[in-house]
Amino acid sequence: MKLENKVAIVTGGARDIGRAVSLKLAKEGAKVVINYFDNPDDAQETLNMINNFGGSAIIVQGDMTKEADISNLVNTTINEYGNKIDLLVNVAGGLVARKTIEEMDGEFWDFLMTLNLKTVFMLTKAVVPYMESGSSIVNFASQAGRDGGGPGASAYATAKGAVMTFTRAMAKELGPKNIRVNAVNPGMIATTFHDTFTKDEVRTKVASGTPLRREGKAEEVADLVAYLLSNEASFITGANVDINGGLLFS
């Protein structure tokens, strides 16, 4: 197991890609702290799935846009698993709604920046003091950060593009401490996100336009995350890794 006895925090770790990441890390031997926001049933189900195969995990409710909730997440982690955190996966984020520039106001723009970008900054700042040499961070950006996103996704795409830049900056800043920072850029992955925000005909068109002729799976993204966190990727840092079936090349 490539992550045995590592302590990992996964924000937004209770459903869809976050759940797949939590399960994968636990299967690789990590002790996983699953953050969730508003659905305790999803969190409990994820925890039960990990317990069923003998993994180690806890669930912690919290709004990652709030510093007090982030502090509680970190404190709960170190109280449960000891005074170190090896791995951080920043999954929490979202599109919220599709809005054109005419439909957006400053409050909506600021909320999208906070939800998708500032949370990554705040979590990184809170967790790094507990990280030792060899620790690793994986942020979630998006294909939207490279191509500008679909209709009404400009704020989301801009925030995700900034996550990519922040990832590069932190790789430089934390590299001398031997802490690696990478990001993943999912394309069309079959999740609740697209169930909510993408029309079926658009999904079909996008999937058929990929060289692999399909949508991706949450488990495939989780496999990539686990690799980037592991020592198998020990000389990879500052990378923004696309996972989109070949739909868009870096």
Image: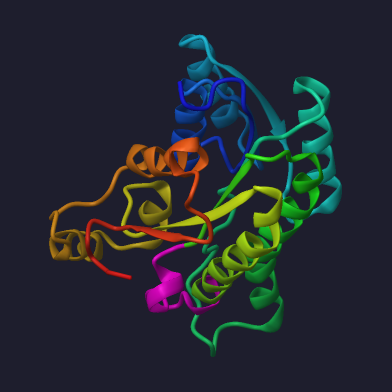
Where's the C terminus, which quadrant?
bottom left
Vertical arrangement, residue 41 with respect to residue 143, above or below? above
The extreme bottom residue here reads: 102
Query: Is residue 238 inside the magenta stretch?
Result: no
In this rendering, the answer to whether 245 lies above or below 34 is: below
Is residue 165 visible in the rendered image? The answer is yes
Residue in front for this viewpoint, 113 or 186: 186
Q: Up-down: is 112 above or below 239? A: below
User: Which residue lies at the image location 78% right of the left edge and 54% below the top edge?
Assistant: 125
Q: Position of residue 72 (x, y in %)?
A: 83, 38
How far from the left and from the top, in percent, is residue 59? 67, 27
Bounds of the magenta span? 142-156
**Can residue 89 be seen in the rendering of this structure?**
no
Query: Residue 163, located in which quarter of the rendered image?
Result: bottom right
Residue at the image point whose x is 13% and y is 60% from the top? 211
Position of residue 232 measured from the top left corner of the image (x, y, whole percent): 43, 38
